[in-house]
Amino acid sequence: MDLDVFVTAHRGEWDRLDSLLRKRRRLSECEVDELIALYQRTTTHLSQVRSRAPDPALVAHLTSLVARGRSAVTAPRTAGWRDAGRFLTAGFPAAVYRARHWWVPTALVSVVVSALLGWWIGASPQVRASIAAPDALREMTRPGGQYESYYSSNPAASFAAQVWTNNAQAVAICLVFGVFLGVPVLWVLFQNLVNLGVGLGLMQSAGRLDVFLGLILPHGLLELTAVFVAAGTGLRLGWTVIDPGYRSRRAALAEEGRAALGMAMGLALVLFVSGVIEAFVTPSGLPTGARIGIGVLAEGLFLAYVFLLGKRAVREGETGDVEEADRPATVPTAA
């Protein structure tokens, strides 16, 4: 290769690429097409120079051009308020709605198992004795005992932050580690079922089940729904490893994984609302009916949000995945 002839023949293309990359205004459609074509040709030129006439100065110049060109044609968009609005009004509810065949059965089975576990503990003195000594059980279930004082043991704001952190960790485990065939998800569900079942059984045996339900239902309806949604999504992600369907396993995991990570952000907001209710409503002096009513209202609003807004978004083609422009590009595309 005659390097001087090669540079003379292609310098105009390199200078034009450099000029397009330096423009601060938004490029026109024709300029975008030209930028992509010049980027691809310059990439080829760099490969030719490296293999046939590796001049250090020219290689450095073309490498810089190619790197800048790659950033321009494959860089993701910058997220803005429009993206946040789309996520809250379409992406998140659609993702939850699409996963309903997993999390609704998960919720029903979990509630039934917890109720049966609570009945078994409440009806069996032997089981209760294996949980703790009689004095410890009385301390937990008496008026003003551990079950009641738990909700007012710390200032409301710090208690809400603590509750939100703990629940967010459980949700994150379900969503992120569901890919391990759902095994970590089942562990999180088991812990929640045992905690709920023990509380039901012990308070039932003390004749104070109504008090326990008055404490758990205001925030628990929304909180447990968030956990069930995360668990169902994690189990679906684990099943995708086994059966990716019509997609390749890599593509299926990428799509479902992105939707699951997006769902984590949405469920964090749901858990924030639940934590506020648990910190400020559950231990408040409101009548039990009013506290439960607030919890039922919050749960009803969330379900309406999912089954009305989410269903409509799915019908319009929303999947809960990020926008196409933000997905990994398989070919160079304009930013």
Image: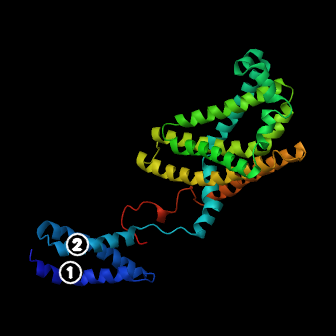
For the point 88% across and 42% down, the residue is 288
User: Where is 329 relative to 18, above or below?
Assistant: above
- The residue identified by callout 1 is 10
Counting from the top left corner in percent of width and height, residue 206 is at: 84, 25
Question: Of all residues shown, which one is farthest toward the right?
Answer: 287
Calculate the distance from the C-alpha at mark 2 to the C-alpha at mark 1: 16 Å
User: Where is 271 relative to 238, above or below?
Assistant: below
Query: In terms of depth relative to the viewer, which is nearer, 252 or 215?
Result: 215
For the point 22% across and 72% down, the residue is 60
Side of 22 relative to 89 (left or right): left
The amino acid sitting under disc 1 is: His
Dot 2, crowdedness within 10 Å: few (<14), some or many (≥20)? few
Side of 8 relative to 77 (left or right): left
Counting from the top left corner in percent of width and height, residue 132 is at: 72, 21
Q: Quadrant of the C terminus?
A: bottom left
Q: Secondary structure at mark 1?
A: helix
- The residue identified by callout 2 is 60
The amino acid sitting under disc 2 is: Ala
* Res 109 visible: no
